[in-house]
Image (cartoon, helix red, strand yellow):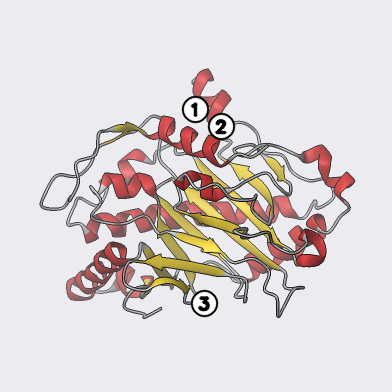
Amino acid sequence: MARSQVPVIDLGPWRSGGATARSRIAAQVDEALQAAGFLLVTGHGVDPELPARIREAARGFFRLPAEAKHPYAVRVGGRGWLGPGAEANSYAEGEASPPDLKESWSFAADDPTGTPSVDAEWFRPNTWPAEAPELRPLVTAYLAAMRALSDELLELLAAALTLPRDHFTRHTGHPTWGFNVNWYPGTERVGPPLPGQFRIGAHTDFGTVTVLDREPGAGGLQIHTDADGWQDAPYDPSALTVNIGDLLARWTGDRWRAGRHRVLPPPAHAPAEELVSLVYFYECDPHTRVESLPAPIGRVAHEPVDSHTYLRGKLDAITVN
């Protein structure tokens, strides 16, 4: 996929550069989010040892026998282990498919707002696997970095639309978020893929921005654009992969497209390939009213939506069991 479709955005010049550099970066971001909905972001300041150590600890848990993991089993949107067959992401697009070939440990927002009905649905305590005690401090540090980075990205995105810096972050004072550690084992664990079965089926994410730390692989991430169809996503070991989700696309009146993507099944030529991805899904404050920006920024005037009614519908759509 051409770099013009998914550019590398260095946050260093964005943070410390002059007006000319910042204007150039903002224009690159606007162009890329219109074309593909994806960016590669460097200069983010996240210690590369942190995701590496999370992967090591998570692999230890995922490789345990199924009976050791079952006590932590939850449904999509819960806090715990999403086992084989729990999700089929293509259902979010209305396409039936076999379940996704992955397992996940799922975390989500857990800092209560004080509103019981909101907290009961969106801010429940996280679960931590006793078999991997080292995960808690590592994930806690990583989540703090992701929250700060996501707000910075939303400020950059506001600038790319020539909006006030806080246009989006004024709605992230007490946001919801999700964080999945996704394990993609080889065929010795999941068996050969069924027709139409992927590690993650084709979909767009549901929130504002998604920040992905991934491993490259033959059965890895693909991005869909109108210009190129499905192509392997570009990879830079120093970069995080960022895409926007449905809520932000609606917010921009479809000026920007939610990044459509999928993860290929284990490849026939490398059936033992095993990958782990760290996926941070950022959203906004519960029950934010998301209204499309008018022309000339926006292209389509969607009906306003309640952010979390919308998110709940999407989470329910991809739930298999």
Q: How far apart are marks 1 and 2 (CA)?
A: 8 Å
The kind of residue tagged 2 is Phe
Whichever of callouts 3 and 1 sits on the residue coming sooner in the sequence is 1
Asked if marks 2 and 3 touch (Cβ < 8 Å), the reply is no
| Quarter of the view holding residue 294 | top left
Asked if marks 1 and 2 touch (Cβ < 8 Å), the reply is yes
Query: Which residue is most to the top?
Result: 116
Is 13 on the left-hand or right-hand side of 316?
A: left
- Would residue 122 be visible to someone looking at this image? yes
Q: How far apart are marks 3 and 1 (CA)?
A: 35 Å
**Of 279 and 230, the residue lying toward us:** 230
The quarter of the rendered structure image containing the N terminus is: bottom left
Whichever of callouts 2 and 3 sits on the residue coming sooner in the sequence is 2
Residue corresponding to mark 2:
123
Residue corresponding to mark 1:
113
Q: Position of residue 110 (x, y in %)?
A: 58, 36
**Of 65 and 270, the residue lying toward us:** 270
**Of 307 and 187, the residue lying toward us:** 187
Whichever of callouts 1 and 2 sits on the residue coming sooner in the sequence is 1
- Would residue 286 be visible to someone looking at this image? no
Element under label 3?
loop
Query: Which residue is most to the front?
Result: 195
Label 3 crowd (10 A; few <14 / some 14-19 / many >=20)? some
The kind of residue tagged 1 is Thr
Q: In this view, does 310 lie above or below 158?
A: above
Residue corresponding to mark 3:
238
Is 66 on the left-hand or right-hand side of 73?
A: right
- Per the rendering, the mark at residue 277 is none
